[in-house]
Image (tube, helix red, strand yellow):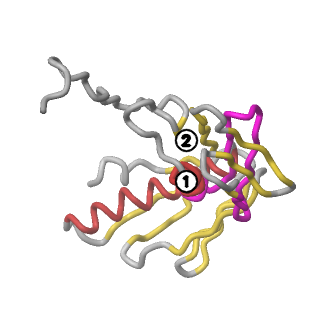
Amino acid sequence: MSRIGKKPVAIVQGVKIALADREIKVTGPKGELKANVHPDIAVEVVENQVILKRHSDEGKYRALHGLWRALVQNMVTGVTTGYSRKLELVGVGYRAEMKGKKLQLLLGFSHPILFAAPGGVTIEVPTQTNITISGIDKALVGQVAAKIRSFRPPEPYKGKGVKYEGEHIRRKAGKAAAAGGAKS
């Protein structure tokens, strides 16, 4: 059995799970998430646990088993505590601010970048160089963070750009000065 797939998902207090056909709906204090479960994975709610089973021991089905167990666990965690990602802006003049419901980024281009957050995701700017993205859907929070980072990924020479909090940027050495001067 899949090591992750065989572990049941604990339903914490305040979370309700409803199954209808192939759809699983998880409701909690922070909101509601839905997903259509793969047809080869069976889902059961027993007491305060969600148990996922597969019908075959092939590698494809073992992988799906672990995947769907992790997705259901992420849904339960999302509706109880939520998820957040933090970004840092590194560079002279790089800054962020909220303009209404849109995030305005100044990243060294000739124009500011305006980014509207999709529904279910909130963006906060505690300081001009820090951005916090939070929501109940782990995949959506990560996708929004990756999209914002893609506007100006960190470069390897000075490390300027948008990076995840705690991300280590591998640095490269700059041009070395010529040893004997210019050759003709």
Residue drawn 68% across the image and 56% down it: 111
Q: In the rendered image, is residue 80 in sight?
A: yes
Q: State if disc 1 and disc 2 touch (CB < 8 Å).
A: yes
Q: Which residues are magenta?
A: 114-141
Residue nearest the observer in this picture, 153 or 70: 153
Which is nearer the N-term, disc 2 or disc 1?
Answer: 1
Q: Which residue is mark 1?
A: 151
Q: Looking at the rendering, in which quadrant would you find the C terminus? A: top left
- The answer to whether residue 54 is left or right of residue 124 is left
How packed mark 1 is, by other alpha carbons closer than 10 Å (few <14, some 14-19, many 20 or more), is few
| Mark 2, secondary structure of its residue | strand
Residue nearest the observer in this picture, 116 or 52: 116
- The answer to whether residue 171 is left or right of residue 45 is left
Going by the picture, which residue comes out furthest to the bottom? 21
Name which quarter of the figure residue 41 lies in. Answer: bottom left
Q: Looking at the rendering, in which quadrant would you find the N terminus? A: bottom left
Q: Is residue 82 above or below residue 54?
A: above
Q: Amino acid at mark 2?
A: Val
Residue nearest the observer in this picture, 66 or 92: 92
Point out residue 162 in the picture as x, y percentages from the top left corner: 55, 41
Q: CA distance from mark 2 to mark 1?
A: 8 Å
Q: Which residue is mark 2?
A: 162
Q: Is residue 172 above or below residue 105?
A: above
| Mark 1, secondary structure of its residue | loop
Query: Which label is found at residue 184?
Result: none
